[in-house]
Structures are given as C-alpha cells and as structure tokens.
Amino acid sequence: MLDLTNIGDKALTFISNIQWTRLIISVIILAIAFTAWLGLRKLCRKWMNGENARGSKKTFAPVLWTVIRTVLILITGMIILEVNGVNVSAALTGLGIASATVALAVQDILKDVIMGIHILSDRFFQVGDVVILNGRMGVVEDFSLKTTKIRDLDEPGLRCVCNRNIEDITVPADMIILKPGLPYGLDPRVTDEVLGSAAARIAKLEDVTDARYVGIGAFEDSAVSHRIFIYCPKEELYRITRAANRIVLECLNEASIGIPFPQMDLHIKDMAKTSS
C-alpha cells in the first residue's frame, strides 16, 4: 500500500525548507531581465529598420544585439546565483581555469569572432555592399561575428564564409574597365573610330550611366591593349560586362579587325652556312 501520510510529510518538509524570500527575489529578477530583454530587442529592431538594407546600422545592429543579449544573460545568471547563496567569485575562478582548456578546443570560433570584430571596427564592408572575395563577386546579405553571407552575382547561390577565412576582400568601384587587345600595325585613327563607336553603343545599354573610350592602356607581347571605361551599378557589373564584350566584338567584326592571338617569332639559323 502506498503510504500517503509519509509522502505528505516529505512534501511538507520540502516546502518548509524552501527559502521563499530568495525564490521571490529570483522571480522578480527574472521578470525584470525579461522585460529588459523585450525592450532592448525592440529598440535594436527599431534602430536597424530606421535605415534601408544598406549601411552601417544594418551591419552593426545584429552584432550589437548579440552582445547585449549575452551580457544580459550573464549578469542575470550571476545575480540569481548570488541571491541563492552561491559564491560567484569562486565559481568564476574555477571557470577561468576551465575556459583556458575550452579555448583550445574552440580556437577557430575565437578566430572568427576576432576577425568579425576587426571587420566591424575597420568597416571593411557593410550589409548590402557588393564585394569581390576569392575572385567571385557578390552582395553581402548578412554579417555576424562568426560568419559573413554573400549572394553571388554571377551564379545562383548563397555563400557562408567563416570570418577567419576573409583575408583579402575588395569593394569594387561603380565601373568596368574593358581591355580589348588589337593587333599592332592598325591605324590609330581607325582604332579610335571603331572603339569610340563601341563605347557609344555600350552607353545606350540599360543601367549604364556613361561609357568612354580613353585610348591605349599598354603595349603587350602580342597586342596593343586599349581601355574603355563603363560606369554602372555594382550589382550589374557581370551582366553589363558580357553585353559590352559582345558589342566590342561586333564592332571589330564589322570593321574586319581580328583579335590577335599570342604569337612567337622563331628564327632558324642555318648551321651549315655557319660552319662553312
């Protein structure tokens, strides 16, 4: 038979041992912390949404909220432990020894966070910026202290890059520099006319604000490299580059100008005449 009297006595003993003052104070602290949580989250969201998706606020707000949330949880936990008689100072001393061991296991995460702070403080880029990372261009969709998410412009997909792997990143200008190579020996007046006409046609493309042929850029091994400057939004660089290359090729074909291939001159020495 189940001894209900014994169970009831144990329950009464347990309830009598509860320190109600500490319990009530702990509940009040939790309520205050939860209210602060909701208020701070609302302020962060309001501050972030006060600007469009591009800009420093959109980049900084998620990181700021992560820091605030972590600090709030830690402070609330330590206060509740102190209220309930736990020596937080001694616990932190032991935690410091243990954290050194844990740090070795999570050193990659620490590298991500340190690099994330570095990116944020030096303003390498912002959410909404077009960037070039490892030769691929994309739009920064999201940023945190651990990872950066970039949506590629040339092919579908969302890249998630650990911040520790971001060593060299470029924020391109709002322009394209075409470098068509033409054969040596062409009349410069013909070159100016053909590439000038190509630049005028490129300027009429959608989203292109201006396009200009600026002249010879370099003398290379097998061709004379020319320069055409095209001004357009960063998000359209790949599309406009493809369209501009097609226009240049069409203009060269119309003028019967071929694109030179790498060439090498071979000089054959007549050994028989040399020996005689």
Image (cartoon, rainbow, N blue to C red):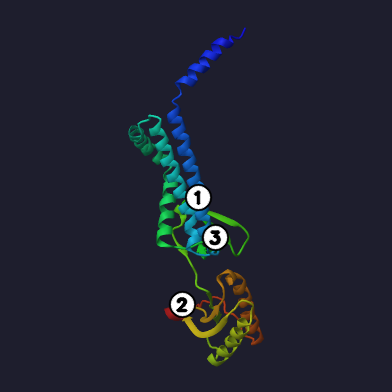
Badge 3 is on which residue? Answer: 49
Quadrant assignment, res 199: bottom right
Badge 1 is on which residue? Answer: 39
Mark 2 in CB contact with mark 3 (< 8 angstroms): no
Precedes in sequence: disc 3 or disc 1: 1
x 44%, y 62%: residue: 124
Q: Amino acid at mark 1?
A: Gly
Give the CA distance from mark 2 to mark 1.
Answer: 92 Å
In the image, which disc is placed on residue 271?
2
Q: What secondary structure is found at the residue carrying circle 3? A: helix
Residue closest to the eye, 45 or 113: 45
Q: Position of residue 116 (x, y in %)?
A: 44, 54
Residue closest to the eye, 29 or 180: 29
**Res 148 seen here:** no
x 52%, y 13%: residue: 9
Mark 3 in CB contact with mark 1 (< 8 angstroms): no
154, above or below 230, in the image: above
Packing grade of label 2 (10 A; few <14, some 14-19, many >=20) is few
Give the CA distance from mark 2 to mark 3.
Answer: 81 Å
Precedes in sequence: disc 2 or disc 1: 1
Q: Amino acid at mark 3?
A: Asn
Packing grade of label 3 (10 A; few <14, some 14-19, many >=20) is few
Residue found at the very far top of the displayed protein: 1
